[in-house]
Image: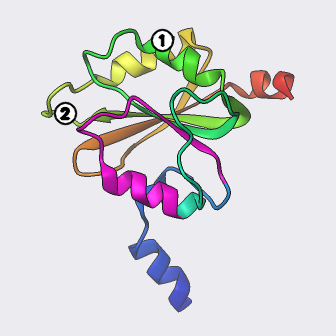
């Protein structure tokens, strides 16, 4: 195995897990005091750009949606986030892990996604306190939006 390949596996950052690459436009929604700043720093470093603010109308490649149990209607939030998303982009719903304050049940995300016109493709641990669920438009909708 080449040296570089082995090292990149060991040092896989949260930005890598989220599929963030150089030049990607990333929007953050739901920022509060409890977010993982280290995660945000790795996303900014990897993309090479500041995060697009929540009130921006710019089209983005990815949305980081911090979501907690008491944040309201997840379907509404997903539909709002989706309006700014490039046709091939993804929404990462970032939720407190089980046992943490304001934990969101994975089933809540699975139920909300199709209502918002999205499909869940994966769930990962993005930090000590946060999990991430990747949502995308179904392939048939992505093709129609192009």
Q: Position of residue 30 (x, y in %)?
A: 39, 29
In this figure, which residue is indicated by the disc labeled 2? 98
Image quadrant for the C terminus? Answer: top right
- Residue 120, magenta (yes or no): no
The answer to which of 14 and 7 lies nearer the viewer is 14
Question: Magenta region: which residues?
Answer: 24-45
**What numbered label is drawn on residue 44?**
none
> In percent of the image, x 64 and y 46: which residue is there?
25
Rendered position, 32 above or below 37: above
The answer to which of 131 and 37 lies nearer the viewer is 37
> In percent of the image, x 14 and y 29: which residue is there?
101
In this figure, which residue is indicated by the disc labeled 1? 75
User: To which quarter of the image does residue 142 belong?
Assistant: top right
Image quadrant for the N terminus? Answer: bottom right
> In percent of the image, x 30 and y 48: which residue is there?
36
How was this image coloured?
rainbow
């Amino acid at each position: 195995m080449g040296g570089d390949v082995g090292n990149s596996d060991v040092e896989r950052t949260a930005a890598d897990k989220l599929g963030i690459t150089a030049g990607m436009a990333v929007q953050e929604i739901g920022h509060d005091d409890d977010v993982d700043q280290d995660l945000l720093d790795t996303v900014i470093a990897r993309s090479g750009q500041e995060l697009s603010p929540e009130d921006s109308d710019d089209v983005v490649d990815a949305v980081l949606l911090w979501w907690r149990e008491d944040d309201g209607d997840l379907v509404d939030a997903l539909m709002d986030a989706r309006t700014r998303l490039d046709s091939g982009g993804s929404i990462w719903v970032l939720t407190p892990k089980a046992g943490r304050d304001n934990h969101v049940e994975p089933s809540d995300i699975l139920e909300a996604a199709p209502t918002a016109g999205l499909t869940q493709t994966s769930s990962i641990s993005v930090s000590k306190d946060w999990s991430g669920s990747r949502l995308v438009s179904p392939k048939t909708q992505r093709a129609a939006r192009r």
